[in-house]
Image: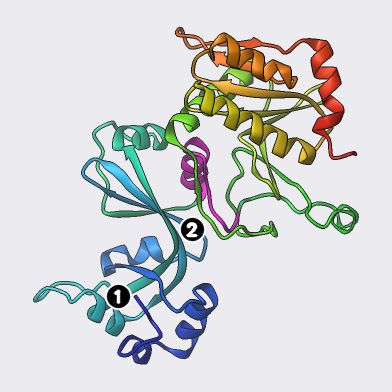
Amino acid sequence: MEFTLSPYDELLTGDQRALLKTLHPEGAARFWGATGAHDKKFADVTTGDVVLFTGRGQVRAIGEVGAIFRNQALADLLWPPQAGGPSWHTVYSLTDLVPATIPYEELNSVLGYSPAHSFPGQMVLRGDRARAVLEDFMITPSTGTGVPEPPAAETAARPDPVRIAAMEELRTHRTGYRRTGRLVVVDRREARLVRAYRLFLADQSLTARRFFCPSGISDMYLETAEGGEVIEAKSEAGHRHVRQALAQLLDYAPYSPSTVHRLIALFPEAPDRDDMRFLHRYGVDCVHREPAGGFVRTPAPAQRRALMRSLWSDAF
C-alpha cells in the first residue's frame, strides 16, 4: 500500500506518518492487522520483531515488524470489518517478508507444544520462545541480531567490525550491529543439518556460534585449542553445492574472530570422490552425516591445509 497517497495519508497521525516514512522511505509497505483479542499479545511488539504467518498446517511466510500503532480508522479502511465484527485496529507494517514452508509439527516440537497444536493466522516471536525458534530455524532479523558490541578500540581499528554471538542469542533490541536491511531465513534442510551437527558437537563439549561480518553470516563457528573453525552447511552434496560451500568459506575466512585453523564444508551425505578432492585441493575439510545420524570428518591433507592457511587470512 502507498501510504503517502489519499485517503491513507489523511488517516495517519503525524507520529505514525513520520515513523512509516523512516522505515519505508519509498512510501509503500505491506500492512497487517490484529483485532482487540490480540491486544495483550501485541502490547510489547516493536520494530524488528519476527512474525510467523500460518495457515493450512504450516508456517507460510516469515516477516519482520516495521511500524506498529493503533489506528482504527485506517484499519477499517484497509480491512472493512464484517457487520458487528471486530476492527483490526492494531496496524503494523512489514519491513521484509520471506516465503516459508515449515510444518506445524516442526514448530510445535521447537516450542514444546503437542504435535497436533494449531496456530492462529499470525504469531509474533518474543522472549525465550523467539530465541528457540530463531535458533532452530536459523532466522536472522535485519535488526536486532543480538551480536554484542566490540570494544571501542577494536571498532576504531576496524571500520567493519566482526560481531560474534552465541547461537542462542540471536535476538535482542540492544544491538548496534550494522544492519543489512534484509531478513535472512536459511533453507530448512540446511537449518536441520546445522542443528544436528551443533548437537553432535555439544556432546563433545564444543559450543557452536555464528559470526556476522561484511561478507554475511557464517553458519557455524568454533574456537578450539588449535584455532578457529569456520563451517558452511549445504542442503545437498552435488557439485554446485560443493562449489558454493567453498566460495562462502573463502569469503568468510578473513573475518574469522580468531585465526582460522580449519575450514569445513558440511553436507547431508558424502560428496563424490572428485568433489572431495576439489575441497581438499583448497585445504578444506569435509564433514558429512551418516545414515545412522552421526557425522564423519574427512580432513584435507595436513600439508595442503598448511599451504592454504596463509591464503585464507586477509594478510597479503
187 over 89 or under it: above or below:
above
- Give the magenta range: 127-144
Q: Is residue 208 visible?
A: no
- Looking at the image, tell me whether mark 2 or mark 1 is earlier in sequence order: 2
| Residue that badge 1 annotates | 89
Magenta stretch: residue 142 in it?
Answer: yes
Whole-percent x, y for residue 81 in the image:
16, 74
Quadrant of residue 152 within the rendered picture: bottom right
Relative depth, front residue between 312 and 6: 312
Q: Is residue 224 left or right of residue 26?
A: right
**Relative height, residue 80 to residue 272 (above, below):** below
Q: Are marks 2 and 1 in contact (CB under 8 Å)?
A: no
Q: Element at badge 2?
A: loop
Q: Residue furthest left?
A: 83
Which residue is identified by label 2? 49
Tell me how many marks there are.
Answer: 2
Q: Is residue 7 magenta?
A: no
Residue 188 position (above or below residue 67):
above
| Mark 2 vs mark 1, CA separation in Å | 19 Å
Is residue 269 shown left or right of residue 282? left
Residue 104 x %, y %: 30, 37
Residue 103's spot in the image, x, y percent? 30, 36
